[in-house]
Amino acid sequence: MSAKAIGKAGGLLAGTVFAMAALATGARAADYNVQGFIRQEPAIKLTDEENPYNQQGNIFNGRTVTLDSTGLGGVVTTTTRPIDSADNAFNLMATRLEVDFQANFNSNWSGFAKLRGYFQPDIFDGYGDPEFFETDLWSGGRGTFLEANGRNYMVDLPSLYLDYADGPVWLRLGNQQIAWGESLFFRVLDVPNGLDLRRHLLLDLVAEEFADERVAAPGVRGSYRVTNDIEIEGFTQLFSPSVLANPDTPYNVIPSQFTIHQEEGFDDAEGSMNVGGRVQAQLGDLALQAIAVNRRNPDGVFHWTDSGDPILGGTPFSMSNTGVYSAQEWFTYAGMARLNGFAGFNTAIREFQPATGGLGAAEVPTQALAAAELDFFFQALGPLRGHIARVYPRENIFGLGANYVVNAGAGSFFDQLVIRSEFTWTPDKTFTSPDLSRSHIVEDEYVASLVFEKYHRFSQEFPATFMVLQYLFKSESDMFGRHLSGMGATGARTSGLPEGEDSFNAIAFAVQQPFPNLIWRADFSVLYDVNGGALIQPGLKWKPNEAWTAEVFANVTLSDGGNDDIIDTIDWADEVTFRITYQF
C-alpha cells in the first residue's frame, strides 16, 4: 500500500478508532447495542447452461473448429478445445455472518461498526483452483480497504465510523458507504462508490438497492442544514474501485481467455481522493437536489497491454491452453464482450510494434483477412491469451434530481404518488474502446431516469402495496458501462461486426405486497432492456418471529440474443436463491 494512502485513509481510521475509544472511556452512560445475523445463501441453477465466460463453460469446449489461413497462402486444419465442460448444480452456496456494533456516547457523538464474514466453499465443478475473493488491488490481495480474505472467504468492515451531530451540523468520519439516488436497478445520482461483484454479482434482491454491493471506503462526510428546507452536504473519500468477480468463479462476466492486469492501473490511482457535494431543498411538495462529484471512475476502462510473456513479450498475447483456439472463437467472444474483433486485432498489431511486426503480424483491410491471419498464428503458436490493463480515469459528474408528491384527494389512486427524476452529465467521460486501444473513447454522457412510486391499499384486509415504475436513458453506454459502439456483433468469422446503438433504454417495474400480520411478503420485479432482454425476479419472504427469516427468490433471464442487450450477458444465470437467516 502506498504511503499516501496510509497517510490519508489509515490516519483517518486510526483517528476514528482512537476517538471511539476515548469517547467510550469518557462516557459513563454510553448506550451500546450489538446485534447481527447468520445466514445460509444457496443459489440453485434452473438450467444446465454453464457460465460461458469461464473455461469450463466455454461454448467451444469439445467442438472441432476449422482453422483456415488460405487467404494468406496458408492451409486448412482443425482444432478442438480440449477443456472439459462443467456440470454444476449451484451458482452459490455461501454462509454469511454480519454483526453490527452501535454506541451512543453522548448527545453529540455516536459510533457504528459492521463486521461481515462470508464463506463460499468450493463445491463447484470449475477449472483449476480459482480465487473467489483475492484481488490484485490493495496490498495482500484485498479487494477493499478494510478486508482480509483467502481463497474461499472474506472478512471486512464495510462500516467503521463516528457520527457527530449538533444542531444543523452533522459529520461522519471513517469507513462508510455513500448512497445517493433512489432508483431500483439503476444508478443515476448514486455515483460516489463502486460495486463489489464477487459475492452475487447484481443478482441479490432488487429491493436491497446495492446495499451489499456498494464499496465502502474511508472518508469524511458532512452536512449543514441552512434552514428547515435547505441542506448542504459534502464529502471527501479515498478512491476504491469496483471489484470484479474473478475468472472461473460462478459470476465472472469477463471472458477467461483474457488476463486482466489490475495492479498496474491501480498503482497509479491508489491514494487518490474523490470529492463531491450536494444541495437539497424542499419547496412544499417538490424536493430538489443538485450534485457535483469529481472522482476516479470506479469501474475503470480497459485496453491492450504487454503480456510480459517469455516468448511473446512486447505483444498483448501469451501462449496458453486457456486462451483462444481459433478465429471463430475470437470473433464469437469479442461479440459477447461487446468488442470489435476485427478492429481489436488490427489495434493489437499497430500499438505493439515492433514486437508484433517481428512475428510477421500485419494490419489487414478486411475481417476475412484478419480471420485468416488469426488462424495462421493459432496454427503456428497454438491457443493465445489476450492481456488487458484496467485503468481509472478522473471524471466530473454534475447532476440534478427532483421529487414531487401528488395530492389528488383521499381515495384517489394518484394521491401521494411520488414522481421522481434524476439526471447526470459527465463531460469528456472515458470509455473502453471496442478495439481495446490505449486511445480510449472520450465523449460527453447523459444519464436520466424517470420514476413513479406509490403505496396504495387495494383492500382493507391487506397492508398497502408498494409499486414502482422506472425508465432509464443513457446516451453513450449500457447499464454496465460498456460503450454502445460495441453492440450487435453476431460473432460470425468473416462478417457481423458491431453495428452499435444510438442510446440505451430500459424499463423496470417492481411491486411488494405484505400480507396480514406482516409474516409473509411477496415481491415481483422486472428489468426490461428495450433491445430484447428481461430479468424477472419473483420472491417470497416468511418471518414467523423476530429471530428467524426465510426468503426465496428467482432470477429468470430472457434474451433474444444478438449481443445488443444487457441480459444477454447474464442469460446463463437462471437460478433460485434461498436465504435462511437467524438474527441475534
Image: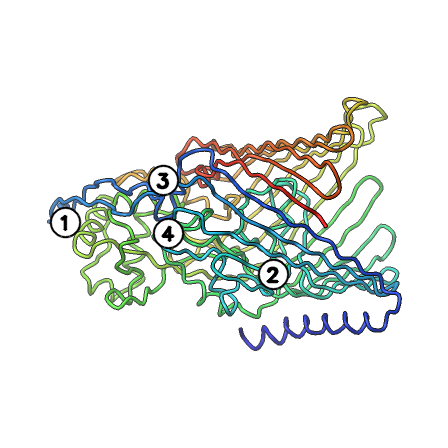
Label 1 to label 2: alpha-carbon separation: 55 Å
Q: Which amino acid is tagged 4?
A: Ser
Vertical arrangement, residue 43 with respect to residue 221, above or below: above
Query: Tag 3's secondary structure?
Result: loop
Q: Which mark is residue 256?
A: 4
Reading the image, the residue beneath label 1 is 72
Does residue 236 sit above or below 202 in this rendering?
below
Left/right of residue 4 with respect to residue 258 in the rendered view: right
Q: Is residue 453 left or right of residue 481?
A: right
Which of the numbered marks, if any, corresponds to residue 461?
A: none
- The residue carrying mark 3 is 489
Spatial separation of the CA atoms under disc 3 and disc 1: 24 Å
- Give the number of the mark in front: 3 or 2: 2
Q: Which mark is residue 156?
A: 2
Residue drawn at (83%, 65%) of the image: 109
Question: Neighbour class for label 2 at 10 Å: few (<14), some, many (≥20)?
Answer: some
- Local packing at callout 3 (Cα closer than 10 Å; few below 14, some 14-19, many 20+) is many
**CA gap, disc 3 to disc 2?**
40 Å
Q: Is residue 472 above or below residue 400?
A: above
